[in-house]
Image (cartoon, grey):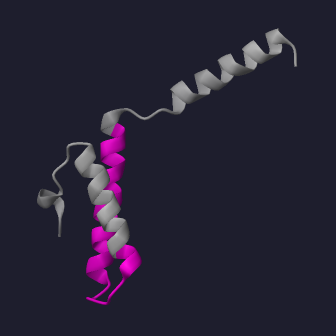
Amino acid sequence: MNVAKKAAFIKKAVMIMEITQMTDKELITTTIDRYTDLQQIKKANGGHKNEMLDYLIRVTTAKLSSLGVNVEDITL
């Protein structure tokens, strides 16, 4: 691949990355949606032990916390 083709390829890749990059607000909204979905699944689970579900909730809680979101207000 010559230099001009490489440059064009890199330019196109950067443009695609910029288009698909989420804003902080979009990331927070998507993560909150995931957290509330997991909470609804846990509630519908009827108290059955589900270690994977608990793990996913903990990870999502940590992500929201790192984004500055307090999950206490949105927990079922």
Instruction: Read off the magenta span.
Output: 26-53
Q: Position of residue 34 (x, y in %)?
A: 35, 59
Q: Residue at x 32, y 88 (%)?
A: 49
Q: Relative to 22, is 10 on the left or the right?
A: right
The image shows residue 55 at horizontal and vertical percentages of 36, 70
51 within the magenta span: yes
Residue at the far left: name it: 73
The residue that appears at 30% across and 65% down in the rendered structure is 58
The answer to whether residue 75 is left or right of residue 19 is left
Q: Residue 37: name its quadrant.
A: bottom left
Reply above or below: 23 against 40. Answer: above
Residue furthest to the right: 1
Q: Is residue 30 above or below residue 20?
A: below
Residue at 52 percent of width and 33 percent of height? 20
| Magenta stretch secondary structure, dominant | helix
Q: Position of residue 13 (x, y in %)?
A: 65, 25
Asked if one can make out residue 32 in the rendered structure from this viewpoint, the answer is: no
The reply to whether residue 56 is in sight is yes
Within the image, what quadrant is residue 16 found in? top right
Work out whether 36 lies above or below 1: below
Image quarter of the C terminus: bottom left
Name the quarter where the N terminus is drawn: top right
